[in-house]
Image: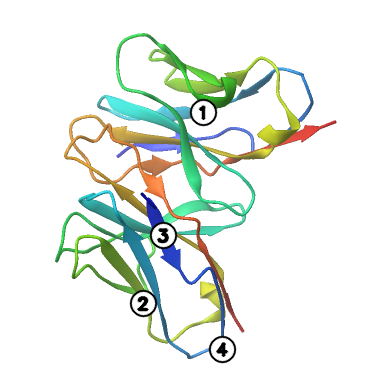
Amino acid sequence: NAGVTQTPKFRVLKTGQSMTLLCAQDMNHEYMYWYRQDPGMGLRLIHYSVGEGTTAKGEVPDGYNVSRLKKQNFLLGLESAAPSQTSVYFCASRGGESSYNEQFFGPGTRLTVL
Amino acid sequence: AQSVTQLDSQVPVFEEAPVELRCNYSSSVSVYLFWYVQYPNQGLQLLLKYLSGSTLVKGINGFEAEFNKSQTSFHLRKPSVHISDTAEYFCAVILSGGSYIPTFGRGTSLIVHP
């Protein structure tokens, strides 16, 4: 039982390049989330999904797109990377319909945009 | 809408001393409360959560938190910290009536000195 995994762990991009971050969970969770973490800013929600085939915008969605084609995977895309997107990205999942269930987080992806 | 305030961005403490990390929230409806810990270069993991019942909640690694409804607080405590407790701590709330999105505080960095 791997929990939540993220690929890749590190990436360096040049401005304007694109990339996709992959999040996978093996807990059969319905809800999945993408956050970015920046110093002094805590966690900010980028996009989330409440089930396969669904996505919704979070607090800071601009410059990102997501897809949830399979229940276990949640992809985060950067179409044209900018230095402001340099951050650590975390994926999380949560199971069940009850809001008292906690989130399970992946180990993070450290992205640098030059 | 709910909000979470972690009053201290950084808390330095000596090993074996007690510590309290403060968390206050605001919400017009009842909420569930969580504390997560993030060790360096890792994702977040659940320390403890309050759903209902006893206001004193015990978590992993000797941590406990007390829910105070009148003061809308959920402070985290440990009677004697170790070097290994050095980490970022996040308080989070979610509406108990059913919500997809937890609200996180900005985090408190606990620094334990030898």
- Seen from this angle, which residue lies furthest right? B114
- Given this view, does label 3 or label 4 mark the residue nearer the observer? 3
Residue A14 is marked as 4
Residue B11 visible in the shown view: no
Are discs 3 and 2 less than 8 Å apart at CB? Answer: no
Which colour scheme appears in the figure?
rainbow
Name the side, left or right, on which B47 lies relative to B26. Answer: right
Q: Amino acid at mark 1?
A: Cys
**Residue designated by label 2:** A77
Q: Position of residue B48 (x, y in %)?
A: 44, 27
Q: Position of residue B54 (x, y in %)?
A: 36, 8
Q: Amino acid at mark 2?
A: Gly
Please determine if labels 2 and 1 lie on a single subunit: no
Closest to the observer: A54 or A94?
A: A94
Disc 2 is placed on an element classified as: strand
Q: Quadrant of the rendered structure where residue B86 is?
A: top right
Q: Residue at x 29, y 54 (%)?
A: A26
